[in-house]
Amino acid sequence: MQYKPNEDRYEKMEYRRCGNSGLKLPAISLGLWHNFGHIDVFENARSILRLAFDQGITHFDLANNYGPPAGSAEENFGKIFKDDFAPYRDELIISTKAGWGMWPGPYGDWGSKKYLVASLDQSLKRMGLEYVDIFYHHRPDPETPLEETMATLDLMVRQGKCLYVGISSYQPTEAANAIAILKQMGTPCLIHQPKYSMFERWVEDGLLDVLENNGVGCIPFSPLAQGLLTNKYLKGIPEGSRAASHRGNGAIDEEHVSEVKINKVRQLNMLAEERGQNLAQMALAWILKDKRVTSVLIGVSRPEQVLDSIRCLDNYSFTSEELRKIDSILK
Ligand SMILES: NC(=O)c1ccc[n+]([C@@H]2O[C@H](COP(=O)([O-])OP(=O)(O)OC[C@H]3O[C@@H](n4cnc5c(N)ncnc54)[C@H](OP(=O)(O)O)[C@@H]3O)[C@@H](O)[C@H]2O)c1
């Protein structure tokens, strides 16, 4: 049946300005790293995307290598986009990235102009789009001069293949250098995409300050530590969960569900219940409490998880006592 989005979708979501730019992003964005590939159920992927947009989630995040197999999340997204979302293109922020290994040989990985230009052209073809809203360099390349990688991002904007550019997983000094080069070229760095959750707090040691000082937005990924920061692993590893599914491509497996982690998860879960939230909601709220964060990038395996997670927006303020308790659990 032809998809008709909810008419009240923009009343439900909060939109935050991305750094000093003109662009606002939804406080919750949806990532297609896992659960949208050819190994997954296509109609489930479609239901998730429809429900997300119905809730005011206007930002979908992809990368050349999402699937598995690599490229298949973009292909599936392209099909769903054509059927369901094409009339709403101007209401959507679609991002993609390149920087991890995508095809064999010396031109299918890292940060050269040769790789990035070819990869974005492939992504646009797979998704059936004329342009993406944000193109990211996916990870720093220790060998390619930063000037070459940043000049390529600048070129893509000038060619109209993307509107904005961003960087992902750059350390504070690397990020500051990249931001400065882009600024000099007249193409500001819109946003940084770092891994950030209660279990991985490296961004607090300098990166968030660099971004704030330069007017660059921040969109943390894996905010639930791929599902660990929910109540799902409290009684073992459920069938069908990411840790049980051996998806590869960076997905957690059984080894990540350690007793040490789960012990902390139990204590965090109790605190979340005291706040009237579940742990997934508290873990997302804990990230959104920081005004330097533009949007939090969630992943889901089922439409209901979108509805559940989005309720973090009901309460993302914490007392200093709650923050102290969280810090002492995480120590
Ligand atoms: N830039 C980068 O290098 C990079 C790297 C990784 C990810 N990302 C981006 O970040 C996005 C999110 O990453 P992620 O998928 O690791 O995020 P995440 O939110 O930490 O983990 C998602 C997983 O958590 C579980 N989950 C989600 N909501 C839940 C809820 N309400 N209750 C219980 N369980 C819930 C689901 O696990 P089950 O599948 O077990 O149900 C889901 O697949 C990606 O899609 C991608 O766009 C970027």
Image: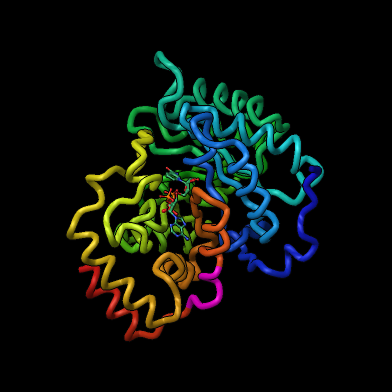
Q: Residue at x 18, y 58 (%)?
A: 259
Q: Is residue 132 magenta?
A: no
Of residues 208 and 185, which is closer to you in this image?
208
Give the x, y percent position of residue 122.
60, 23
Give the x, y percent position of residue 28.
56, 60
Is residue 184 at least partly visible in the picture? no
Which quadrant would the N terminus be assigned to in this image?
A: top right
Q: Residue at x 45, y 24 (%)?
A: 102
Q: Residue at x 29, y 42 (%)?
A: 253
| Image: 318 above or below 219 | below
Which quadrant would the C terminus be assigned to in this image?
A: bottom left
In the displayed structure image, the side of residue 271 where residue 282 appears, left or right: right
| Image: 220 above or below 244 | below
In the displayed structure image, the side of residue 62 where residue 329 appears, left or right: left
Q: Quadrant of residue 106?
A: top left
Q: Quadrant of residue 159?
A: top right
Q: Quadrant of residue 96?
A: top right
Q: How is the image coloured?
A: rainbow
Q: How many marks?
A: 0
Of residues 99 and 199, which is closer to you in this image?
199
Give the x, y percent position of residue 174.
37, 45
Of residues 34 and 132, which is closer to you in this image?
34
Image: magenta residue range = 311-316
Is residue 284 at least partly visible in the picture? yes
Judged from this view, the residue extending furthest toward the left is 260
Q: Is residue 312 magenta?
A: yes
Give the x, y percent position of residue 73.
55, 34
Which is the main secondary structure of the residues drawn in magenta? helix
Q: Residue at x 55, y 25 (%)?
A: 119
